Amino acid sequence: MSETSQLVMDQAVESLLDRVPNPCVGEELSRVEGPLKVSGKATYAAEYTFEGEALHGYLVSASIAKGTVQSIDESSATAIDGVVAVITDFKAFIRNSQQGGEKKAPTQGVKDVDYFGQPIALVVATSFEAAREGAAALKVHYTQEQGAFDFIAELGKREPITSGNDKPEYKNNPDEGLATAAVKVDSIYVTPSQNSAAMEPHATIAEWDGDQLILHCSMQMLSSCKQQICDALGLKPDNVRLISRYVGGGFGSKLGISPESIAAAIAAKQLQRRVKVVMHRTQVFESTVRRTNTRQRVALGANHDGRIHTIIHNTICTNLPGETFFEPTAVSTHFAYSGQNREVKYEMVRMNQVLAGSMRAPGEAVGMLALECAMDELAEKLNMDPVELRKINDPAIDPSKGVPFSTRKLTDTLDYGAKHFGWEKRHKQPAAQREGDWLIGMGMASATRSNDLKASAARVTLTPDAKAIVETDMTDIGTGSYTILTQIAADLLGLPVSQVDVRLGDTNFPPAAGSGGSWGACSSGSSVYMACKKIRAVLAETLGVEEDNLTLQDGIASGNGMSKSIPELIQGNIVAMGQIEPGKTTKEYTQASYGAHFAEVAVNVVTGETRIRRMLGVFAAGRILNEKTARSQCYGGMIFGIGAALMEELLHDPHNGRLVNHDLAEYHVPVNADIPPIDVVFLPERDPYANPLHAKGLGELGISGAGAAIANAIYNATGIRIYDYPLTLDKLLDQLPTL
């Protein structure tokens, strides 16, 4: 076994991928696991079968939003045929889900109820139906208290936030800058709570083998989730194994563990049986995680020439009592545009509603709904083209940190998008283009998404028959991890993709960064890169050539006039560990991906209905590792933007805190009929400061700014600015021009 190959990103690095003959990386390789998925052979968390049937658990949800569980009458459930037990553990059960990357368990202790739907018990039965019936029959007695359910009513109790996942900023004199600005906007934007609405519900199958706990689960970040499980149950890491081969979507809702995982583990231990707990769709909505609602003030001050000197982005968000997560709405505002006077401030309102946490592109997704609409409003006041306003305020260095950008192609994406979308045909005057009952408009917005590198590890084995085995606990949540890691290993080891076997989703493998924050492919891919680099070094030494002179192609190693096949060159397995960690480049350079969204909409003057006619997204995100999976990610992000702009909204009853649209029938997400022709273009780019792949995060870039482009197009079509998302027809109807 060879030693570990480790890289800390302290400086720009060259990429071996640039020396690969006929590279597979970058090509539109179809998903290697695709045939398994379309044939139903890919096994998801709830689908594992074993010798001996598992018992079924069904979570019991609190029917109050604030108060205390006084007693539970178990006989009301155990009288149901098939019910085996009612599992209650008021101290160990977890109240809600956990954030991604956290090592500690979520808040434990469920006797005190903090939101409607909080899991308080588990009914276990021989069938799912019996468990569900038992849960419905279970009699729970509460002492009820008055909760905080009305956001507006609670605004006076908001508290400042000074630390967390984004830092407040106060630079120079933003108040005076805004007051004396030649041209300014100062607006309040409101965004609602949203749900991730992943296709696969949260599910866990728990079993014990002596002191060993094995969970088949649906989780995005296995390494940190394992630590959360250990902390919640008081277990040693060696005694816990998580298996999550395939995840049917997560979008942040499965970054950390959720209530069913701990309940299943406790029930399996008590009953000495395997226990499966699958959340009902309603429980997914009520008991996992939501994107927080926000109230954002965005103020911009500029000179008559359009140069911005003042940017203020202050946000009020919500969460449960005691929780520290908040939506970092201004995370991109810090570096998006120039301006010497800057303020970013966060405040929190404590509400008795389901946990607020990470949802796809936390921060930018809702922050840019506000910032990019404010930019459009400023452009109008300046009588300036919105594209031109953004270009003249594209900073050369990070205006907040004073450090250079690793790469920055925002202006390039704006120019390309404007040309290819036909931006010059946009009517400058709102409500100037009409086709029958439809008003037509165009809008645009910038896209920015911070790039992160996370510590990640992988093990790669090269066998004497020229096959490679890649092992890491990285997950594939539908983003293409299996395929991209296959491409990286195939290129660096000179093998066809059919000779590479990627094994993911098992904590018996080396710990990866996991799927989240758009860092998954780049971080885990870099660890695979480093392991392959070490194997290349061993092969070069065995062949007797310098590493720089080694060429690997089609299972043949060559260099300095020598050539041998892998079977001729090695007699046993070469096993290498690869590790990647962030270093100085993270602090010395601002790293981000950039893009530009363009949208054309039609708004009906009779009904107020908005139809999106076409969209274009142009993105620069370093090396694109797979054109097909990358484009699909951007499609998904832009569709997320459509949902945020036009329809997605979680509604809590302000009288009792109950979530009233807690399923996919009432929580509206975009479907096929809502989606127009979407074009996605990637501009060539490499970022040597990001990682040895020279790639950057992409998946969440597609959502950042997409909704704002639609909102700006609606304004251009109708002359109506709406500051309260989603932009539903009722908010337009009374302001539309008459026939």
Image (cartoon, rainbow, N blue to C red):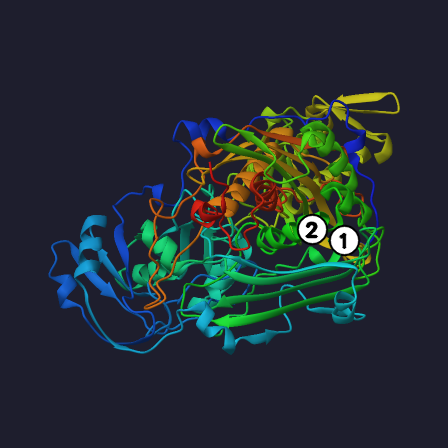
What whole-number distance in Å separates the C-alpha atoms at marks 2 and 1? 10 Å
What kind of residue is marked 1?
A: Tyr
**Callout 2: SS:** helix
Say left or right for 429 vs 350. Answer: right
Residue located beneath label 2 in the image: 375
Mark nearer the viewer, 2 or 1: 2
**Callout 1: SS:** loop
Q: Is residue 149 above or below residue 697?
A: below
Q: Residue 412, image x and y in percent?
A: 78, 37
Residue located beneath label 1 in the image: 337
For this rendering, which residue is in front, 88 or 67? 67
The first of marks 2 and 1 along the sequence is 1
Residue 133 seen from this side: yes
What kind of residue is marked 2?
A: Met
Crowd around label 2: few <14 · some 14–19 · many ≥20 (10 Å) = many
Label 2 with label 1: CB-CB less than 8 Å: yes
